[in-house]
Image (spheres, grey):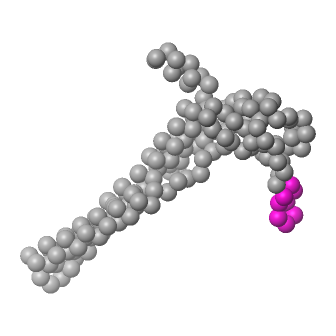
């Protein structure tokens, strides 16, 4: 049985973010019509610190909520933000490195040996580039989740005050 440590770490951070309850000021209420057979969504726009957040409420909470009132809500989990620039740069570097490796190997060796060595070198360069891209994406996801937790965590605010 395999254990994916990155998935466990991400799940732990998401669970921690979802378990937070913070209080924000309602600045707008609106109903969004849904397409198809889905029910109408009741959305409340809440201001928390310097951020505007939209959150869904059920029917009874939506009717009781007034503009200007302070309500408790759970922050939403940020979507994955792929780093296309980083991936593109690593792709170009990998292609250039593969080209140089193939050129160097074929200029010093000939025949089957050069083909096998070139294939192996290009494969390893590709694996290294793939691993670098994936680890960067995962680390970026962890940083984004940590930043959200730091922003919303009320206990972290006290820690910041102790440091100042």
Q: Residue furthest left?
A: 108
Q: Residue furthest top?
A: 162
**Residue 104 lies in quadrant:** bottom left
**Does residue 85 appear to the left or right of 147 in the view shown?**
left
Q: Position of residue 40 (x, y in %)?
A: 86, 55
Is residue 3 in view?
Answer: no
In front of the other: 99 or 46: 46
Q: Say whether residue 39 is magenta.
A: yes
Which residue is drawn at the image coordinates 57% and 38% (left, top)? Answer: 148
**Residue 49 lies in quadrant:** top right
**Does residue 34 appear to the left or right of 162 in the view shown?**
right
Q: Is residue 105 above or below residue 50?
A: below
Chief secondary structure of the magenta portion: loop
Q: Residue furthest bottom?
A: 111
In front of the other: 38 or 15: 38
- What residue range appears in magenta? 33-40
Q: Position of residue 34 (x, y in %)?
A: 83, 60
Which residue is drawn at the image coordinates 44% and 46% (left, top)? Answer: 139
Which residue is drawn at the image coordinates 52% and 17% (left, top)? Answer: 161
Q: Position of residue 83 (x, y in %)?
A: 45, 56
Is residue 144 in view?
Answer: yes
Q: Say whether residue 120 is magenta.
A: no
**Residue 152 lies in quadrant:** top right
Which residue is drawn at the image coordinates 24% and 67% (left, top)? Answer: 97
Q: Position of residue 35 (x, y in %)?
A: 82, 64
In front of the other: 91 or 122: 91
Q: Is residue 43 above or below residue 71?
A: below
């Amino acid at each position: 049985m395999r254990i994916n440590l990155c998935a466990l770490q991400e799940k732990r951070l998401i669970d921690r973010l979802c378990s937070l309850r913070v209080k924000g000021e309602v600045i707008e209420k609106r109903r969004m019509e849904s397409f198809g057979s889905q029910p109408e969504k009741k959305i409340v726009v809440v201001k928390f610190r310097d951020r505007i957040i939209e959150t869904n409420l059920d029917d009874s909470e939506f009717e009781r909520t007034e503009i200007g009132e302070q309500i408790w809500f759970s922050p939403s989990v940020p979507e994955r933000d792929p780093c296309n620039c980083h991936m593109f740069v690593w792709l170009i570097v990998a292609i250039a490195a593969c080209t140089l490796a193939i050129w160097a190997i074929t200029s010093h060796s000939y025949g089957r040996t050069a083909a096998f060595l070139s294939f192996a070198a290009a494969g390893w360069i590709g694996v290294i580039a793939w691993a670098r891209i994936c680890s960067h994406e995962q680390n970026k996801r962890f940083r984004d989740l940590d930043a959200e937790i730091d922003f919303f965590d009320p206990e972290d605010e006290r820690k910041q005050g102790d440091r100042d």
